[in-house]
Image (spheres, coloured by chain):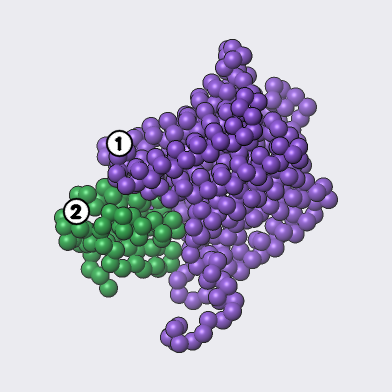
Amino acid sequence: MVEANQTLDCKGLSCPMPIMKLAKTMKQMEKGRILELLATDPGSKPDVPAWCKKTGHELLETAEEDGVYKYYIKCK
Amino acid sequence: MPDETEKEKGIFRELYDTFFSHSWQMWVGSIILAMLSICLFIIASPWGSSGGLLNWGQNLFEGLGLSLENSAPNGVTFIFDNNYALLSLLLIFGALASALFGKEFAIRVAPVGELVKGLFGGILMGIGCIIGFGCTIGNFFSGWPALSAGAIIFVIGLVIGVFIAVRYLLWEMEKHPKMSSGKSATFLQAKTKGTSLQPLAGLIIIIIGLAFAFTFDNPILFGFALIGLFIGIVLQRSRWCIVRALREPFMTGDAEPAVAIIAGLTIGLLGFTVIKLTGIGGELTFVSANFWMPAIVGGIIFGFGMTIAGGCTVGSSWRAAEGHVKLWLALIGIIITAPLTLEYIRPAFLDILPTWMKKQVFLPDYFTYLGAVIIMLLILLIWYVFVKWNERTGRFSAM
């Protein structure tokens, strides 16, 4: 299980808010730090990996627990 | 826990996983939707969305005893007697069933600021779709294949509205982050451990939807009901979204949603042209008298509203079915303001316009069918080139 340095809670938010907030948070993050993103929008399941791939931030791990999708992203 | 790779999947498990464990690609949804729209056109008229929601709203107003003298002097057709109202209803059934099947249903209550944007966006969409004589389906996904010049102008309006809304959302996130933050709540989500009841509930919803569709003796109503159910499933499965297609180039630069819409438009264009040329369907179907002022004004208002809300008329419908309360409010906004716009705002607006600003322009009347089709294909090609170039260079994308 990945240890995160920061958590971004996007529970309850629907498209495009999770990605918008993710982008803003990652811009302000230091290189190497790990962000835990929490989302309830099913759209985040394809969106977050796609965004990470496009921007070069590493998606370390994903998990799902009772409707909450968790993404662990390492800032590049 | 048995090792999944050693144990062979059951045949029903495999069937389920193929269709419901992941979202479908948006272009797959697009092509299916274009073909279903062609089917609807052959039956009666193409896929449309705002007309159905307008009828819902008119029924609501009539039920509350409020008269609609201008827009419905002879009373309002009941929902179950109106093709599009029925389609819009079964669409929600289908999307709900699909979400349940994929264990993606949950009542999701966004923070208050988001809910406000949902309602406000819906209000703007209700106004925009009536002033513009159509929404993202009637004036775009079906409007472009219908070879309506007004539909092209409407989409120019949409792009302007989307652009302004993206700037607004980015500004709001910077300067007023509390609008999109705060307490949220999620209910009835599928539990990860154990067996969820959602797929069973989904199956029940589908059976109810099918049974309901088959109660209609009128073949057109039956067709619209049945196809509406499938449209709902396809929409939710592929998370089909015109807002994304127009918005992503200004945000992440992702061209995939736009390319998916282009694919659907191309199929639709071919099918609709055959239907119109051969006389199977009326030439002026979905060609409204909105060229050009109603189209541009309606388009801008609708485009801004849909981006704030996070879904157009169909996007709000399938997301509402998935349980997002923000989009319930967007739908409520549309249902309330569309009839009011038709009753009060649009007649006044059209009155002040000279005839040349509110024309019904069918492209083949000016360019022949071949010319019109070539123009449309060129527009699609230019759009494709733009989004792909933007994806690579990031020229217009904020993130």
Q: Amino acid at mark 2?
A: Met
- Contact, CB < 8 Å: mark 1 with mark 2? no
Residue B229 location (% of width, % of height) = 66, 54
Chain where mark 1 sits: B
The residue positioned 32% from the left and 41% from the top of the image is: B397
Q: Where, by quadrant of the figure, is residue B164 drawn?
A: top left
Q: Badge 2 is on which residue?
A: A29
- Residue B308 found in image quarter: top left
Instruction: Please tell me which residue is depicted at 44% across the width and 34% down the height of the picture.
Output: B159
Does any portion of residue B121 appear in the rendered image?
Answer: no
Residue B378 visible in the snapshot: yes
Figure colour of chain A: green
Q: Secondary structure at mark 1?
A: helix
Q: Which mark is residue B32?
A: none
Direction from residue B101 to residue B284 in the image, left or right: right
Q: What color is chain B drawn in?
A: purple
Query: Badge 2, how many Cα within 10 Å: few under 14, some, many 20+?
Result: some
Left or right, B194 with reference to A50 = right
Work out whether B299 lies above or below B237: above
Residue B70's spot in the image, x, y percent? 69, 21
The residues bearing labels 1 and 2 have C-alpha atoms spaced at a distance of: 20 Å
Q: Which residue is mark 1?
A: B171
Q: Position of residue B184 (x, y in %)?
A: 40, 52
Q: Residue furthest right?
A: B217
**Other residues around mark 1 within 10 Å, as few (<14) / some (14–19) / many (≥20):** few
- Residue kind at label 1, given as amino acid type: Trp
Task: Please tell me whether residue B98 is drawn above or below residue B50 in the rendered image.
Answer: below
Q: Quadrant of the N terminus of chain B?
A: bottom left
Label 2 marks a residue whose chain is A
Compared across the picture, whether A45 is left or right of B272 comes to left
Under circle 2, the secondary element is: loop
For the image shown, how many numbered marks are present on the structure? 2
